[in-house]
Every structure is written in C-alpha cells, then in structure tokens.
Amino acid sequence: MLRRFAVGVGPQDQRPAEGRSDVLVYTSPAFAKDTEVTGPVSLELYVSSSAADTDFTGMLVDVWPNGFAQNLTSGILRLRYRDSREKPEPAIPGKTYHITLDLWATSNVFLAGHKLRLEVSSSNFPRFDRNLNTAKNRHTRHAWSKRRT
C-alpha cells in the first residue's frame, strides 16, 4: 500500500524557495559553539499591502556548513485576522500594520558552524492554502487581486 505524506512534512531543503525574489532571507553568522534554542518562536513585522488581504509567512531554518537549509518551524498570518480570528477585517491598502506571527515552538541544537536563518514571504503554498488577496471567501471566489507587499 502506497502512503502519501502531507506536503511540507519533515525536514526539507529550503534553498529553492530562498532563491525566489519574493522571499526575504536573513542569516546569522556561524555559531562558534553548539547552541540550543528551545521554546516558542514568534515573528513581529510592520507590513503594508496594496491588497485588502494577503498572507505573511515566516520560517526558522538551520543552515548546515554544506549549505543545506533545513526548515525547523514556520507559521502564517492572514492579514484580515490580524486582530481577531472571529471577526476578520479587510486591510486598508497602503496602511502599515504591526503584526505577530506565531511560528510555533522548536527545540534545536545549532551545531558549531551552523547558521540560524529567518525567511519571510507572502506565501508558503502548497503548505498553506492560497490567498486571492481580495478578502473574499476563497471557496466561492476565483478572481485574483495582484498585490505589492
């Protein structure tokens, strides 16, 4: 029996995604000694968009000395849910918002020579569903809105 695993499950090399022009990548210097990082991870951003809704994603990555960029933990925030999951509110295009993404928790030992990396983007498809950037119900709408984030 062939079993399929969900997309984005387990360690994957993030270098192909990091090469995209819509992914911001921030990398620390190499760790001089083994360093444990354990606990909840969050990402605070100041964002604006030309769309009424868009997604913001973050990912914590362990970069090995050979370049392999191993995903550790990630999260997403759909901008319309920035204040409440119960009362979505479209964004005002061009307005700047302070948001916090929950990247969940991790426990990782960054070995000496490894680097910590943060990736920020406006999509992580197919891991997270697509966003039409319209603030409309994605199950009943099919028209996309181009946005600048």
Image (cartoon, helix red, strand yellow):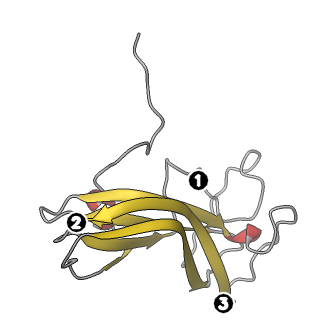
Residue occupying the point 18% across, 79% down:
32
Q: Position of residue 142 (x, y in %)?
A: 68, 50
- The residue shown at (73%, 73%) is 82
- Give the secondary structure at mark 1: loop
| Mark 1 lies on residue | 130
Residue 131 lies left or right of residue 74; in this view the side is right
Mark 1 vs mark 2: in front: 2
Mark 1 and mark 3 lie on one chain; the one further toward the N terminus is 3
Residue at image mark 2: 111
Q: Identify the element where label 3 is drawn.
A: loop
- In the picture, measured across the screen, residue 49 lies left or right of residue 137, that is left
- Classify mark 1: residues with Cα within 10 Å, few (<14), some (14-19) or many (20+): few
Give the amino acid at mark 1: Arg
For image coordinates 60% across by 71% down, the residue present is 101
Residue closest to the eye, 9 or 19? 9
Which mark identifies residue 96? 3
Q: Position of residue 65 (x, y in %)?
A: 14, 66
Mark closer to the observer (3, 2)? 2
Q: The residue tagged with tag 2: helix, strand or loop? A: loop
Residue kind at label 2, given as amino acid type: Leu
Question: Could you tell me how far apart the alpha carbons at marks 1 and 3 are, in whole angstroms?
Answer: 22 Å
Q: Earlier in the sequence, mark 1 or mark 2?
A: 2
